[in-house]
Image (tube, grey):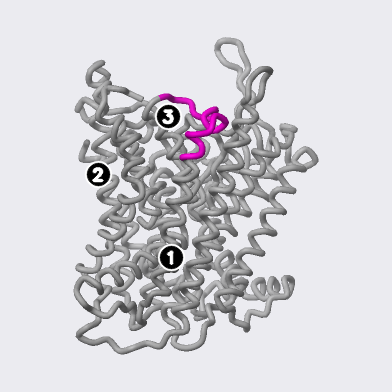
Amino acid sequence: MTLMGWLQIAVFFAIIVAITPLLGGYMARVYTGKPIILSRVLGPVERGIYRVIRADVRKEHDWKAYAASVMLFSLAGWLLLYLILRTQTSHPFNPQGFHAAPWNVTFNTVTSFLTNTNWQYYSGETTMSYFSQMAGLTVQNFVSAAVGICVAVALIRGIVGRSGKGLGNFWQDLVRTVLYVLLPISIIGALVLVSQGTIQTLSHYLTAHTITGLNQSIAVGPTASQEVIKNLGTNGGGFFNTNAAHPFENPNGLTNIFELLLIFSIPAALTATYGRMVGSRRQGWALFAAMTVMFAVGVTVLYAAETHGTPAQHTAGLHTQLFSGSTGGNMEGKEQRFGIAGSALFNTVSTDTSTGAVNAGLDSMTGLGGAVPMANLATGEVIFGGVGSGLYVMLLYALLAVFIGGLMVGRTPELLGKKIEAREIKLASVGILITPLTALAATGLAIADHAGRVSIFNAGPQGFSETFYAYLSQANNNGSAFAGYTGFIQPSAGNIGSHGVTFADLLGSFNLAFARYVPILFVLAVAGSLAGKKVAPGGLGTMRTDNTTFVVLLIGVIILVGALTFFPALLLGPVVQSLTGHLY
């Protein structure tokens, strides 16, 4: 570990702390209907969209109507994206003449992008036309991110609601999220990336003549516009197969930090939005503090583990000479441009959120280092988390923490003056547990079934880790992967490759959709239940939810739930590997 590495991490997080109240306050104004500067320019566009889709935004939705709108919108998006990808052969902006991917890969891809996961069983530069990337995948990057933010805002409205059961209007929230939050930042961000060398073109792939006399095809495309929203919307995925390690997506150290800021900006700012909307900024900073502690632990462990290397590397004498003069470290699978610190920070941030973008190979990490992304996913991605999803799952944990704390000290379980009763706790508990149970069940099926084992590349604890991580990543709508696990093997005579990967594609699709939308239904049900409750004034028996004690309790509950559900699986994979002399 080096001083420059720690300084890079510290500067990054200092910027996040600085922009959190600014962006959070802006989003609070957007969702409470207060005037904003962009309304003068985009107001007519917003009203025109309402007329086109025939949405009466003056009518508030209860939780059932809000949920129905979310599901119908998502279903329509799934059908449209599937049609786009399956008709790729006839697309414009297809200079390479790519055909459509197999139906099972397309089925998985559509479900993945719909759920804000961007899990990819394909290589983008050899599979997708420019039209598919722009009109299909990039559009879903916007709207899937917007759906998550809308659900979080609906839950906040349920918490602060004083009478009735209205949670706002989904269509208004969706349009305002895209027009006033995601689109302006994406335009500015894309220009910044282009200025630093991220490519943006519709031309044919380039051909380079190498010194050996051979020709090499260099993939290009409209990358910057997709890169910015994939990070800002915590979507993940990559225009190119190597993701943020590719110099056309992530050209230098400055873009590396900039993309990390895009990933963390909205999830962090939503804590401030929550504080503004509930009328107590301390409430938002309490959630921010809990997230910060877990982030700091994760990045420290990952940085230390990768700097130290594995027992096998020490035994073999595979020490890497760092520019600072120190020895040691695991540089396998990492970009020299970013080094261990930049890679550790990027992979921590991307798995703290539901982004899944990576600038280094997770499969090449040490056993202990690989345990950090798994542990981040095992928390339900509440360490800032995905846009919207991180906040609403954290608020479910807050309800659970209030209830447990109240039982322990004999105080009334309340959140901002609203009593937390059996109904809310049951809904919150199921909403929290759906994701880990889905991931564990899918992992068990993949390991036990012969068709599932076809997708596993490595043996031993690493093979278990890559399988477990795949389904854990999908269930948490993250999208990152231990690269050995595959769902796209070309079938050949005498093997069952096509059967095996179809199993992985379909099981993964169920995993993606079930773990995304079922928790959303429970979150909205909690919001609906809270919206109808009266607010009681706080007293001596009320447990505060904006102090250090509550932050510690909240972190403890998150760790306890994660440990009880995932500790055995972590023992079978990365922990066993880290205690042995095996490199992988």
Q: Nearer the viewer, mark 1 or mark 3?
A: 3
Q: Are marks 2 and 3 in contact (CB under 8 Å)?
A: no
Callout 3 environment at 10 Å: few (<14), some (14 to 19), or many (20+)?
many
Give above or below for 74 relative to 281: above
Dot 3 corresponds to which residue?
Answer: 463
Would residue 399 be counted in the magenta stretch? no
If the image is split into quadrants, where does the N terminus sit?
top left
- Of callouts 2 and 1, the N-terminal one: 2
Query: Could you tell me residue 321's position as x and y percent?
Result: 25, 23
Q: Nearer the viewer, mark 2 or mark 1?
A: 1
Dot 2 corresponds to which residue?
Answer: 300
Q: Are marks 1 and 3 in contact (CB under 8 Å)?
A: no
Q: CA distance from mark 1 to mark 3?
A: 33 Å
Dot 1 corresponds to which residue?
Answer: 392
Disc 1 residue type?
Tyr
Disc 3 residue type?
Gly
At x 34% / y 35%, what residue is drawn? 572
Classify mark 2: helix, strand or loop.
helix
From where the camera sits, is residue 186 visible?
yes
Give above or below for 453 relative to 82: above
Q: Is residue 295 left or right of residue 74?
A: left
Magenta segment boundaries in residue numbering: 444-459
If the image is split into quadrants, where does the C terminus sit?
top left
Callout 2 environment at 10 Å: few (<14), some (14 to 19), or many (20+)?
some
Q: Is residue 337 left or right of residue 180?
A: left
- Of callouts 1 and 3, the N-terminal one: 1
Query: Could you tell me residue 202's position as x and y percent?
Result: 67, 40
- Of callouts 2 and 3, the N-terminal one: 2
Query: Could you tell me residue 469's position as x and y percent?
Result: 43, 40
